[in-house]
Image (spheres, rainbow, N blue to C red):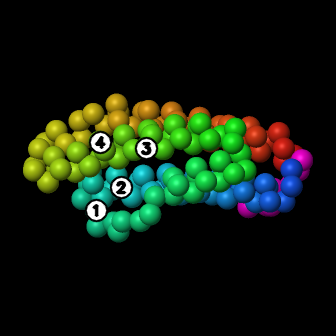
């Protein structure tokens, strides 16, 4: 991500909120990756607070036009996390098919994540030239 401050056709507070939203969105990807490593592969990864609440808060206050996309991403991430927990249980029970269904579980999450990212990038390009 470009580290220059956002400037453009909106106020400083909204610009800072957009920067925060973009940063938190990256954090959601890292959070999902940590969960995947923990549940599917058994890595010793500490539990952290999910950043999805922050995404929804920033969206609802500063960018209500992204709230539906943020909620859709949260729902898809919840379903993906459920699959990961199930896969982790299968792994612990030494089920060799524990990663079965990965693509079906991951793809909806990836689509929703990319939809939000695309919308944020389009908005940023329009308002910050």
Q: Could you say where residue 19 lies in the image, as x and y percent from the top left? A: 71, 57
Q: How far is the residue under mark 3 from the one under mark 4?
A: 10 Å
Residue for point 19% across, 42% down: 98
Left or right, residue 116 beside residue 122: left
Q: Is mark 2 on a helix, strand or loop?
A: helix
Q: How far is the residue under mark 2 from the one under mark 4?
A: 11 Å
Disc 4 marks which residue? 83
Q: Could you say where residue 92 lies in the image, as x and y percent from the top left? A: 14, 54
Decide: is 89 above or below 4: above
Find residue 77 and name its label: 3
Disc 1 marks which residue? 43
**Which stretch appears magenta?**
3-9
Q: Is mark 3 on a helix, strand or loop?
A: helix
Closer mark to the observer between disc 1 and disc 4: 4
Left or right, residue 77 beside residue 55: left
Q: Residue furthest front?
A: 61
Q: Which of marks 3 and 4 is nearer the N terminus?
A: 3
Left or right, residue 98 beside residue 28: left
Q: Earlier in the sequence, mark 2 or mark 4?
A: 2
Disc 2 marks which residue? 35
Q: Which of marks 3 and 1 is nearer the N terminus?
A: 1
Residue for point 24% across, 59% down: 42
Residue for point 57% across, 42% down: 70
Q: How far is the residue under mark 1 from the one under mark 4?
A: 17 Å
Taking depth in this image into account, of 69 and 118 the one nearest to the observer is 69
Q: Earlier in the sequence, mark 1 or mark 4?
A: 1
Q: Which of marks 2 and 3 is nearer the N terminus?
A: 2
Q: How far is the residue under mark 2 from the one under mark 1?
A: 9 Å
Work out which quarter of the rendered image holds the N terminus and state it: bottom right
Decide: is 48 above or below 73: below
Residue 1 in the magenta stretch? The answer is: no
Closer mark to the observer between disc 2 and disc 1: 2
């Amino acid at each position: 991500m470009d580290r220059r401050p956002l400037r453009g056709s909106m106020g400083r507070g909204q610009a800072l909120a957009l920067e925060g939203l973009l940063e938190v969105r990256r954090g959601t990807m890292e959070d999902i990756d940590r969960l995947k490593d923990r549940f599917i592969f058994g890595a010793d990864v500490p539990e952290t607070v999910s950043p999805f609440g922050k995404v929804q808060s920033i969206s609802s206050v500063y960018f209500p036009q992204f709230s539906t996309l943020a909620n859709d991403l949260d729902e898809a991430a919840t379903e993906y996390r459920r699959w990961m927990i199930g896969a982790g249980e299968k792994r612990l029970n030494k089920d060799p098919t524990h990663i079965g269904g990965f693509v079906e579980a991951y793809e909806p999450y990836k689509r929703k994540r990319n939809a939000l990212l695309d919308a944020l990038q389009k908005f940023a390009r329009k308002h910050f030239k």
